[in-house]
Amino acid sequence: MTLIPAFNDFVATSWPQLHPQDANADAQWAVYDQAVSERVQAMLADPFTQGHPGMVTDLLAEDVLETFFGPEWVAKRFAQADTRSQEDARWVLPAHRRRELARRVYEFQSFPWFQDFLDHTRTNDVASALYEGDVLSALMHLPGTVTRNKAKGVKGEDFDVIVQFPGERPRVPVEVKNKDDDAAFTDTAVRKILKKAASQLPSEEIGWVFLRIPPAWVGGRLEEEYPEMLHDALRQTSRIGAVFTAIDKFRLNAERSKVSTSRFWHYFPRDDAPPALRETSFDLFRLLDQGMDYFAPRAPF
């Protein structure tokens, strides 16, 4: 049984009875999101689930992903998510990613590039697809238009996202990179991934790179060496105006049955980037650092 209806199904079945003359997508989303929020609150208040919000979140996450990708895809991609034990913590990342991917899928339903995002996610590594979703959501913090750029397989045109700002501020192409969880922390690894990202950005524009690093990289060495690695890498290209690095920290409770996550952002701007781009880059970092999300949609689970 579907716990949460898909947005398109809601619009097709419920919207005509509610507002038959109004086809405004923003209004449709507001009504849909409110209806889903009420359904989630009812689930949380149910005597069977009361006091177990994590269980509700897991049920809803699995439900949303199965709606769009099918049960077999979800079972295969998140096989370890429910194998929780005190002896084995390998469930932590799959469980976290299942929840977060479901939230991004829910939040993106009303956007014209939603199907492109689904297609990309279906055929790519979950961690990479999720991080691209996180970046799309993060960029919605800014008052601009965010669009997925369809891959063309052409050097300089194969970046992931376009952000178009109003007024005098520039259009910014964005490339998203997710480093494998088992990748070693070396200068060569950082230089290589940024070189690849630069080749995917347009030669006539200056863009941003969003990089997610493995949790194993977090530590004193990262703080001491990472900025210098970025500085050296950016000296080799003029296409990258700033690097935003997502640093995730995971904590298990004493019973090793529940995980809490925190994301921190490391911001490294290019010294000689155009003033308008530097200003915009810093505005985004400040919003990310303060956790402000006024413009981005937010899943109610």
Image (cartoon, grey):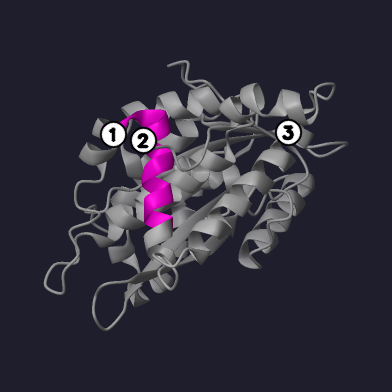
Is 223 on the left or on the right of 216, as rendered? Answer: right
* Range of residues picked out in magenta: 57-71
Q: Is residue 60 visible?
A: yes
Residue 127: give x, y in percent of width and height: 35, 45
Binning the other alpha carbons within 10 Å of mark 3 as few (below 14), some (14 to 19) or many (20 upward) gives: some
Element assignment for label 1:
helix
Residue type at mark 1: give it.
Pro
Viewer-closest of 219 and 149: 149
Element assignment for label 3:
helix
Which residue lies most toward the right here?
A: 167
Residue type at mark 3: give it.
Gln
Q: Which mark is on residue 71?
A: 1
Instruction: Kindly indicate whether the residue at mark 2 contacts the one at mark 1 (C-beta within 8 angstroms).
Output: yes
Work out which quarter of the rendered image holds the N terminus and state it: top left
Q: Is residue 86 above or below residue 23?
A: below
Residue 135: give x, y in percent of width and height: 54, 45
Residue 62: give x, y in percent of width and height: 36, 45
Binning the other alpha carbons within 10 Å of mark 2 as few (below 14), some (14 to 19) or many (20 upward) gives: some
Q: Which residue is found at the position 88% from the left and 36% from the top?
A: 167
The residue that label 2 is drawn on is 66
What whole-number distance in Å separates the C-alpha atoms at marks 1 and 2? 5 Å
What whole-number distance in Å separates the C-alpha atoms at marks 2 and 3? 23 Å
Which residue lies most toward the bottom here?
A: 254
Q: Which mark is on residue 28?
A: 3
User: Magenta span: helix, strand or loop, mainly?
Assistant: helix
